[in-house]
Image (cartoon, helix red, strand yellow):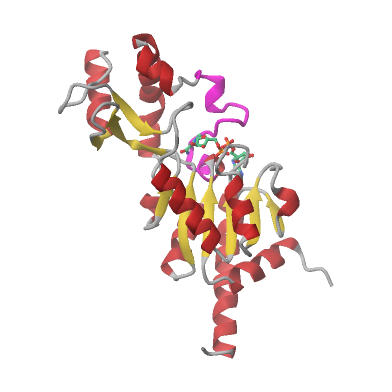
Amino acid sequence: MVADPFDRAVRLLARARSCVALTGAGASTESGIPDFRSPGGVWERFRPVTYQEFLASEEARREHWRYKAATVPEMLRARPNPAHEALATLEREGRLLAVLTQNIDGLHQKAGSRRVVELHGTNRETECVRCRRRDPIEDALRRWERENEVPTCLSCGGWLKPATISFGQALRPEVLDEAVRLAREADCFLAVGSSLLVQPAASLPLLAKEAGASLVIVNLTETPVDPVADVVLRGRVGEIVPRLVARALAEARVSEEREPE
Ligand code: NAD
C-alpha cells in the first residue's frame, strides 16, 4: 500500500538520526519577510547591486545602502515562526545536525537553533570590504540615516557592507565546505521554503541524496529537485514543518520504547 506523502515524510524523519535542514526565503515569509521571487518580492522594488559595482561606484554603494536601510530594520524586528521553532526543537531533541540556510535574517538563531550555517552571510552585521572587521549592523544603519553617507570602518576607513554575499561575490569557502560535509553526513535531508534554483543550495540536496540520505522537500511551488525527492510536500512551511516534526518525534519515541538500544 502506498502511504500518504505526509505519513511517508513522518516515517523518514522519525527513522533519521542525523537530519540536516536547508532553508530558503520561503522559511521566513510567514515571519513577514518577503522572498525574492514571489509576487511582491524584493526584486520588484530594488535592483540587485553586484559586489563589483559596490567596490567600483559611489552611486552603487549608496543604492545598496538605500535598499538595506529600507529592508534590514524590518528584518531585525521579525520574529521566528513555527517552522523555525520546529527545526530548533528537532535539534534540541538530538535529531538535527544543523540548519544550512540561504537566509540572512538570523531567525533560526532567534528560534534557538545552535548550529546554523549561513551560506549567504548575514544582515545582522556589517563587514569592512578592506580589513574584514565585523560589527553589529545597527550602528552603520544609524550613521547612514544620520549622515546619508556610506558608512566606513572605524578601524581602517574602508567601506562597510552588510555581511551578506552579494551577486558576483564568492561564497566563503569554509562555509561552503561545512555545508557540503553536513549534507554528505545527513541520513535525512529536509529542504524547506527554497526554490532550489540558486547555487549551491540547489546542489546540496543532490549531494545528500547521492551519499544515501532520504530527501523531503517542503515548498509552496515546484522546484527542479522535486523529481529526485523521496517526498514532496506542497504547502506553507509554518503549517507543515511543525506538524511533521511533532509527529516524527512522537513516532521515534514510540519505536525507541519498543526497541530500546
Ligand atoms: P526564493 O525567493 O528563490 O524562493 C523561495 C521559495 O519559497 C519559493 O519557491 C516560494 O514558492 C517558497 N515559499 C514562499 N513562502 C513560502 C511558505 N510560506 N511556505 C512554503 N514555501 C514558501 O528564495 P531562495 O530560493 O531562498 O533564494 C533566493 C535568495 O534570496 C536566498 O539565497 C537568500 O539569500 C535571499 N533572501 C533571503 C531572505 C531572508 O533572509 N529571509 C529573504 C529574501 C531573499
Q: Nearer the viewer, residue 123 or 204?
A: 204
**For residue 8, above or below residue 192:** below
**For residue 200, above or below residue 96:** above
Q: Position of residue 140 (x, y in %)?
A: 25, 26
Quarter of the image where ligand 1 sits = top right
For the N terminus, give its image quadrant.
Answer: bottom right
Q: Position of residue 87 (x, y in %)?
A: 48, 58
Q: Quadrant of residue 248?
A: bottom right
Q: Is residue 251 left or right of residue 155?
A: right
Q: Is residue 160 left or right of residue 210?
A: left
Q: Position of residue 85 (x, y in %)?
A: 46, 56
163 in magenta: no
Q: Nearer the viewer, residue 251 or 99?
A: 99
Q: Is residue 68 left or right of residue 31?
A: left
Q: Residue at x 55, y 84 (%)?
A: 256
Specify whether residue 107 is in view. Answer: no
Q: Quadrant of residue 245?
A: bottom right
Q: Nearer the viewer, residue 199 or 94?
A: 199
Q: Residue at x 52, y 33 (%)?
A: 34
Q: Position of residue 123 (x, y in %)?
A: 36, 35
Seen as rendered, the residue at the extreme right is 1
Span colored in magenta: 27-47
**For residue 15, above or below residue 146:** below
Magenta stretch prevailing secondary structure: loop
Q: Residue at x 49, y 69 (%)?
A: 95
